[in-house]
Amino acid sequence: MNVDQTLVNMPTIGFGTYLIPNEEAQKTINTVLKIGYRHIDTAEVYRNEVGIGLGLKDTFTQLSLQRNDVFITSKVFPGNPSWGREAKNYKMCIEACDSSLKRLNLDYLDCYLIHAPFCKDLRLEQWKALCDLKKEGKTRTIGVSNYSQLHIQEIINEGLEAPEYNQIELHPWCQKKELVSFLKEKNIRVVAYSSLVPLEGWRAKPNQDSAKSQSMKEDGADNSSPFKRMSKKYGMSEAQILLKWGLQMGFVILPKSSDENRIRENFDLSFKIDDTDMKEISTMDRGDGIAWPNGDPCNSK
Ligand SMILES: NC(=O)c1ccc[n+]([C@@H]2O[C@H](COP(=O)([O-])OP(=O)(O)OC[C@H]3O[C@@H](n4cnc5c(N)ncnc54)[C@H](OP(=O)(O)O)[C@@H]3O)[C@@H](O)[C@H]2O)c1
């Protein structure tokens, strides 16, 4: 396949699609691209790739967009033996990418990630599969998600191509400072997910699983949110403050919303958080991420 490898640039604001149901994905992608997003983040486990593919097809025609105008990421779920989910071997990772491409109705991805470092025994084999997918042109770039320094060092020690991205949970309550500086040092782009965790309404609808209700929401922290003060100061919403923090930290961000006004708001980030407030936010770290109900996957052995 003839894919131009020279102009690969992940747009800094992507649209996250976890919990966007497949039936809604086509319409949502249409809205998102009309608003101006040019980066979509999905995964085989989100079960919405078919709807996203339909949305891309329709909207490309409507807006006269070319395939290379939009950056599309998907992820292979590696398996997880401790959850009774078979670990994927090399061949299964190649097949997973082919299946994602088929569902999305695309010839290539812009970025393909290993969703989490769950499979100690097959981690390197899984990474070799991604390296080969890139060589074959099925994806323009490759990376990992929820990998710690140790998981990444394992790849580097093996002399394999280093990941181009690590997608991890990052927000003022989960700042992963050591990991972030390690990634910057290794020239690995930091992609932040679940930027909006500190919002009172974050995944508050029924069945939107996370560990927040147990670990954070009940401690009353939301009521004394300093983001409410900053929201007044800058005339922007709390969500915009959280997202802008991520951008000013140098992260790519992936806000998800099912609401058109919020989708628009999350893309409108042309203001600056001043140094005093950035400094205050830097003191708010509470440790591990809470987006996954079973604990932060960066801690996997
Ligand atoms: N690699 C991984 O392991 C991993 C894990 C988690 C997420 N991700 C990726 O990162 C993306 C974003 O993370 P996320 O989905 O966990 O959460 P998020 O984008 O941090 O937050 C989404 C939540 O915030 C609400 N929200 C969105 N915009 C808002 C606004 N302007 N004002 C108030 N509330 C707002 C949404 O509600 P409404 O939808 O009702 O607006 C939803 O409850 C995911 O969709 C996925 O693509 C990756």
Image (tube, rainbow, N blue to C red):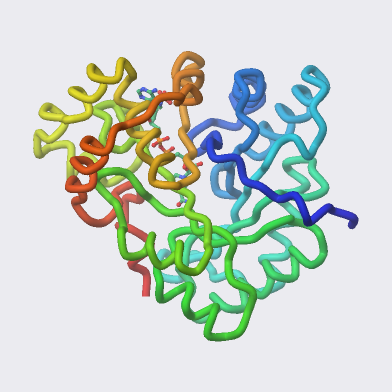
In this picture, residue 102 sits left or right of residue 88: right
**Residue 191 versus residue 102: which sits nearer the camera?**
191
- The image quadrant where one finds ligand 1 is top left
Whether residue 23 can be seen here? no
Image position of 55 with respect to 292: above or below: above
> Viewed as shown, does residue 20 lie left or right of 149?
right
Residue under the point 78% across and 46% down: 102
Q: Is residue 236 left or right of residue 156?
A: left
Q: Quadrant of residue 200?
A: top left
Work out whether residue 65 can be spotted.
yes
Q: Does residue 168 lie above or below 257 as drawn?
A: below
**Residue 221 rendering spot, x and y as whole percentages:** 12, 35
Residue drawn where x is 28% and y is 50% of the image: 174
Residue drawn at (54%, 40%) of the image: 12
Quadrant for the N terminus in the image: bottom right
Where is residue 192? Give x, y as percent. 43, 47
Residue 235, given in percent of the width and then of the height, sits at: 30, 15
Q: Residue furthest front?
A: 275
Residue with the most extreme right position: 2
Instruction: Tell me if 291 is positioned left or right of 54 in this view.
Output: left
Pick whichever, 97 or 234, lies toward us.
Answer: 234
Identify the residue at horizontal 32%, vertical 20% (top origin): 237
Q: Quick one: which residue is furthest to the bottom in this view?
A: 158
Q: Quadrant of residue 53?
A: top right
Horizontal and vertical percent position of residue 293: 32, 50
How many numbered callouts?
0
Quarter of the image with the C terminus in it: bottom left
Q: Name the residue nearer the viewer: 99 or 123.
A: 123
81 over 76 or under it: above or below: below
